[in-house]
C-alpha cells in the first residue's frame, strides 16, 4: 500500500535507503498489521513469532557493524524502520528500535573490544537484547543524578542497589545497562557510571508494569537491584563518565522517537484523506468538500512534509558526526507536539469510527503521549534547547 509520506521520503533519502524502507513497510503490512487488534484485545505483548520475524529481517542489527554480524547501516536506516513499523504501531516499532538505540548504542559508543565481542553478535541477530536502565521511581528528568548506587566492594567489584522503572524491552532483556551513582561528591556530569548487568544475576528482580495504557504491545518493566555484585569488567566506558554515555545514547533515541510521532501523523493523514472522500453526508456528497475539513488535511500534510524533511536532515547530520544535542531535542519536541495536536483533529473528522480499535487512530492518539515524554520530556528538553539562544544568562536558567 502506498502511503502519502512515501512520496516525500523517496526524494529525501537515497534509493538504497528507500528500498529498505519499502521492504519494512511490506513486512509490517503483511506480518504485523493483521495481528495488532487481537494482540491488544488479548492484552498481549508482541509475540515471539513476530520478534523472530523481525530478527530474521535483520531489524535488530541494522546499525551493528558487519564484523559483528550486523547490517552496518546508519541511524537513518533505524529512523526509516521506525517510520515503516510505527505507521501501524509505535509499540511494535519501539521493540527493535529501543533494542538498537537504547540497548546496542551505549555498547557501540563506550564498550571495549571484549565487551563488543561478547555481545554484539547475538544482539545483532536478535538472540538477546540489552535494555537501558535510566528512569527511576524518584528520578525522571533529573537523570544525571541517579538514586541507584554502585559502591566499591572490598577485594574488587561493585555492589549495585536501587530500582529502575519504565524500562523498555525489560521482559526480553538479557542484560541491563544500569546508570548508577558512583561518586556523589563529583562534579556535575562526572558522578555516575554505566554497568552491564546480566538480568539473571542473583538479586535482580524484574516486574512487568501493570495498567499501562500506552505502547500496550511493548514490554515496559521495573528492574530492582538488591545488593547485586558485578566485576570491574561490567563497567561500560570510563568510571564516573556514565552521563556521557547516557547523553550520547539519548541523542539518537530522540531522532527515533520523532520518527514515531511522524509515523502516527502519516497514518492519521491517510485515514482522514480516505474517510473524507468516502463519507457521504448532507446532500449526498463527501464531507471533504467542506473547507474546515480541508484545513485540517492541509495542516497535517504541511506538518508531515516539514517534519520528515527536518528529521531526515538532522539524522544525516547525526550519521556524519556533526549533530548538536539541541538539534535532536528540537526535532523531537516539534514532531511530537505537531502530531499530538493534529491527530485528535483527524479523529474528529472521522467521528465515532475513530474510537474503534480496528480503525487504528485511537492507538496512535494514545501512543503519541509517549513521544512527548520519552527520551526526555518535552518540558525538560526545552531547557536544553534554550541555552544557545541566551548564552549570557545560561547559569541563571531554570
Image (spheres, rainbow, N blue to C red):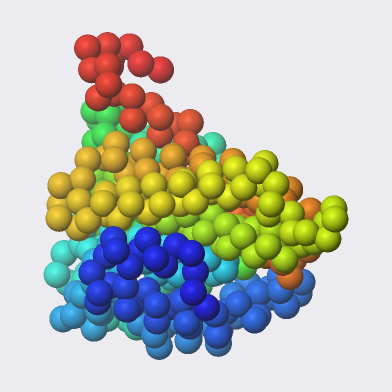
- Where is 384 relative to 181, above or below? above
Q: Position of residue 71 (x, y in %)?
A: 25, 79
- Residue positioned 73% across, 77% down in the render: 38
Q: Where does residue 245 sit, x and y in percent of width and height?
A: 26, 49
Query: What residue lies at 22% left-to-right and 56% top-to-bottom?
Result: 316
Front residue of 350/138: it is 350
Residue 68: quarter of image: bottom left
Horizontally, residue 3 falls left or right of residue 237, namely right
- Residue occupying the far front of the picture: 283
Percent x, y of residue 32: 57, 79
Q: Quadrant of the C terminus?
A: top left
Q: How many numbered marks, from 0 up?
A: 0
Q: Is residue 382 left or right of residue 351?
A: left
Q: Quadrant of residue 138?
A: top right
Which is more toward the observer, 358 or 225? 358
Q: Residue 334 sits in which quadrant?
A: top left
Task: Tell me if I can see residue 78 in this picture.
Answer: no
Which residue lies at the image location 55% right of the left edge and 85% below the top edge?
30
* Residue lying at 62% horizontally and 60% vertically, measured from the top left: 273
Residue 324 x %, y %: 22, 40
Q: Is residue 109 left or right of residue 371?
A: left
Q: Nearer the viewer, residue 158 or 359?
A: 359
Position of 296 with respect to 234 (left or right) is: right
Q: Is residue 35 visible?
A: yes
Amino acid at each position: 500500500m502506498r502511503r502519502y509520506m512515501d512520496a516525500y521520503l523517496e526524494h529525501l533519502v537515497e534509493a538504497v535507503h528507500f528500498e529498505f524502507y519499502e521492504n519494512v513497510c511490506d513486512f509490517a503490512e503483511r506480518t504485523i498489521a493483521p495481528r495488532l487488534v487481537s494482540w491488544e484485545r488479548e492484552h498481549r505483548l508482541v509475540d515471539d513469532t513476530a520478534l523472530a520475524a523481525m530478527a530474521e529481517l535483520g531489524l535488530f542489527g541494522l546499525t551493528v557493524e558487519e564484523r559483528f554480524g550486523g547490517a552496518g547501516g546508519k541511524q537513518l536506516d533505524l529512523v526509516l524502520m521506525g517510520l515503516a513499523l510505527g505507521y501501524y504501531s509505535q509499540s511494535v516499532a519501539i521493540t527493535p528500535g529501543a533494542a538498537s538505540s537504547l540497548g546496542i548504542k551505549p555498547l557501540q559508543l563506550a564498550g571495549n573490544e571484549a565487551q563488543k565481542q561478547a555481545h554484539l553478535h547475538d544482539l545483532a541477530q536478535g538472540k538477546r537484547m540489552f535494555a537501558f536502565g535510566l528512569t527511576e521511581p524518584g528520578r525522571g528528568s533529573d537523570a544525571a543524578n541517579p538514586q541507584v548506587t554502585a559502591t566499591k566492594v572490598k577485594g574488587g567489584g561493585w555492589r549495585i542497589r536501587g530500582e529502575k522503572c519504565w524500562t523498555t524491552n525489560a521482559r526480553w532483556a538479557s542484560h541491563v545497562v544500569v546508570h548508577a551513582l558512583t561518586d556523589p561528591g563529583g562534579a556535575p556530569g562526572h558522578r555516575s557510571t554505566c554497568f552491564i548487568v546480566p538480568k539473571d544475576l542473583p538479586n535482580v528482580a524484574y516486574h512487568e508494569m501493570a495498567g499501562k495504557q500506552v505502547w500496550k504491545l511493548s514490554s515496559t518493566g521495573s528492574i530492582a537491584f538488591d545488593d547485586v555484585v558485578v566485576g570491574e569488567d561490567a563497567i561500560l566506558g570510563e568510571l564516573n563518565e556514565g552521563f556521557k554515555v547516557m547523553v550520547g545514547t539519548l541523542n539518537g533515541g530522540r531522532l527515533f522517537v520523532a520518527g514515531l510521532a511522524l509515523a502516527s501523523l502519516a497514518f492519521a493523514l491517510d485515514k482522514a484523506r480516505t474517510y473524507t472522500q468516502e463519507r457521504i453526508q448532507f446532500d449526498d456528497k463527501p464531507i471533504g468538500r467542506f473547507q474546515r475539513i480541508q484545513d485540517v488535511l492541509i495542516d497535517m500534510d504541511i506538518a508531515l512534509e516539514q517534519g520528515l524533511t527536518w528529521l531526515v536532515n538532522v539524522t544525516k547530520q547525526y550519521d556524519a558526526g556533526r549533530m548538536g544535542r539541541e538539534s535532536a531535542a528540537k526535532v523531537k519536541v516539534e514532531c511530537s507536539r505537531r502530531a499530538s495536536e493534529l491527530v485528535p483533529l483527524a479523529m474528529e473528522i472521522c467521528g465515532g469510527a475513530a474510537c474503534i480499535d480496528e480503525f487504528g487512530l485511537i492507538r496512535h492518539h494514545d501512543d503519541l503521549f509517549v513521544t512527548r515524554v520519552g527520551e526526555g520530556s518535552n518540558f525538560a528538553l526545552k531547557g536544553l534547547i534554550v541555552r544557545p539562544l541566551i548564552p549570557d544568562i545560561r547559569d541563571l536558567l531554570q
